[in-house]
Amino acid sequence: MRKNIFFFDKCKLAVGLLIIVLLMVFILPASAAETKVEYEWRFGVPWSRELQNESMQLFCDLVEFYSDGKMEIKLYPNGSLGTHDEIFHGVQEGSIEVGIFSPYVNLVPGGMLNWMPWTIESYDQSAVAFDSPDGILFKVMSKAWEEVGCHFLFVGLEGPYGLGNNIRPIKTPDDFKNLKLRVSSSLGFVMALQNMGAGTGMTVATIPWADLYNALERGVVEGCWSLWSSMVEERHFEVLKYYTGLGWAWGTNNIVINKEKWDKLPSDIQEALIKAGKVAEIREYEVHRRADADFKKIIADGGVEIYYPTPEERELFREKANMPPIWEELCKPWLEKNYPGENMTQKVIDELEKIHNTY
C-alpha cells in the first residue's frame, strides 16, 4: 500500500482544477441562463483564513456547476454573519444553511472525537480517518453532528498543532515550568496539555481564539497552542518568540449543513454538494501541505525560534499526556451511548492506531 494516499500527482490535480474552472467560466453561464435557481443558500465562515476561504469559495462555485445552476451558495467569510457560535446556532436552527466550525463540546457533545491529541499526526492520516463515507472519524463525527441537527459534509484543514511561548523553547515537558498558556473549550486538548505540564507549575487560561493575539501582545498569557497557518495568517508569529513543532494534535474544521434542509434536497442536489465537497477537500489537503513549508520560512524570518523535537523527545510528551484515561473520560460515555454494546471506543482507538502505523 502506498504511504501517500493522494494517488493523483500534482500535475493531474492542476489540470483537473483547470478543466473545472474552464467549464465553470465558459459552460456554466450558458446553462445557468436556461436554468432557474431553485436553492439560494448562505455559507457562514467565522474566520479570516485566506487559504481556507479560497477552498470554501471553490466549493460554492462547484455546487453551482455540478447542480447545473439549480443551487447557488453565497460565501460569507471573515465572520460577516457573526461569531463562530452565532453562525453555528444559525445553521442549527436553519437561518443559515451551511457553515464551517470547530466542533467544541459545548456545541457538539461528541465533538471531542474530531481532534483527540496524539492520534492524527499527518495529512495522509487525516485524509484516511476523515474520508467520506467510511473513514472512522468521519463516521463518528457524522453521528455527532446529527445529534445537534446538522449533516457533516467534508473537512477543512488546520493541520498540526505546535506550542508557542515568549519565555523559552519547549524541548521537554520540564520546559512548561511556570508558563501561563491560553487554552480553549477543546477538553481533550486541555487535559492532554495539563498532563504534559503536570508538576511544572504551568497554568492555563481560557481565552477566545479571536482575542489571542491581543492577549499574547499584552502578556495576559505567555504562550498558546497554534498552527503553522495561524502563526502566519493570524499573525501569531508577531507576538511569540519560540515555537515548537510538536505535532501533538491535529486540527480539522467541519463543513456542515442544516440536517432538515439536507434531508429535503433531491438526490441530484445532494450529489452535487458531495462532489463539490470532495474536490474542495482535496484542494484543502494539497494547498495546506504545500503552504506549511512557506509558513515555516515566514515564521523563522519573522524572528521566531523554531524547535523540531526528535521522535524520542516527542515520545516523552506523548507518554506524559497519558491519553487512555482521557479517552475513557471524554469519549467512552458518548460512544457507549450512541453505539451501545459495540465496544466502539476500542474500535475507534484500534482503527486510529492502524492508520498511524500504516501512513
Image (spheres, rainbow, N blue to C red):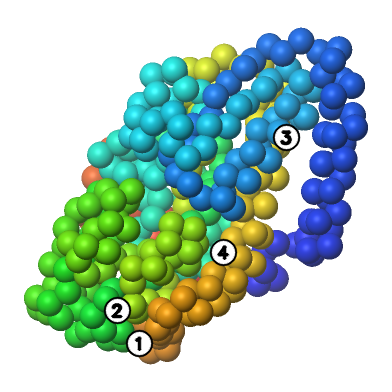
Identify the residue at image location x=62%, y=26%.
73
Q: Which residue is mark 3?
A: 62
Q: Quadrant of the N terminus?
A: bottom right
Q: Give x and y (percent) for residue 16.
A: 83, 50
Mark 2 surroundings: few (<14), some (14-19) or many (≥20) residues within 10 A: many
User: Which kind of residue does numbered mark 4 sit on?
Assistant: Tyr
Q: Nearer the viewer, mark 3 or mark 1?
A: 3
Is 36 above or below relative to 192? above
Mark closest to the chain's N terminus, 4 or 1? 4
Mark 2 in CB contact with mark 1 (< 8 angstroms): yes
Q: Which residue is mark 1?
A: 313
Mark closest to the chain's N terminus, 4 or 3? 3
Specify the quadrant of the image occupied by residue 290.
bottom right
Q: CA distance from mark 3 to mark 1?
A: 44 Å
Q: CA distance from mark 4 to mark 3?
A: 24 Å
Residue 224 in the figure: left or right of residue 101: left
Residue 35 in the figure: left or right of residue 263: right
Mark 3 in CB contact with mark 1 (< 8 angstroms): no
Q: Give x and y (percent) for residue 237.
A: 41, 69
The one nearer the camera, 287 or 8, is: 287
Q: Give x and y (percent) for residue 39.
A: 64, 15
The one nearer the camera, 4 or 327, is: 4
User: Which kind of residue does numbered mark 1 sit on?
Assistant: Glu
User: Which kind of residue does numbered mark 2 sit on?
Assistant: Phe
Q: Quadrant of the C terminus?
A: bottom right
Q: Which residue is mark 4?
A: 123
Q: CA distance from mark 3 to mark 2?
A: 42 Å
User: Which kind of residue does numbered mark 3 sit on?
Assistant: Leu
Q: CA distance from mark 4 to mark 1?
A: 21 Å
Q: Is residue 284 visible?
A: yes
Specify the quadrant of the image occupied by residue 246.
bottom left
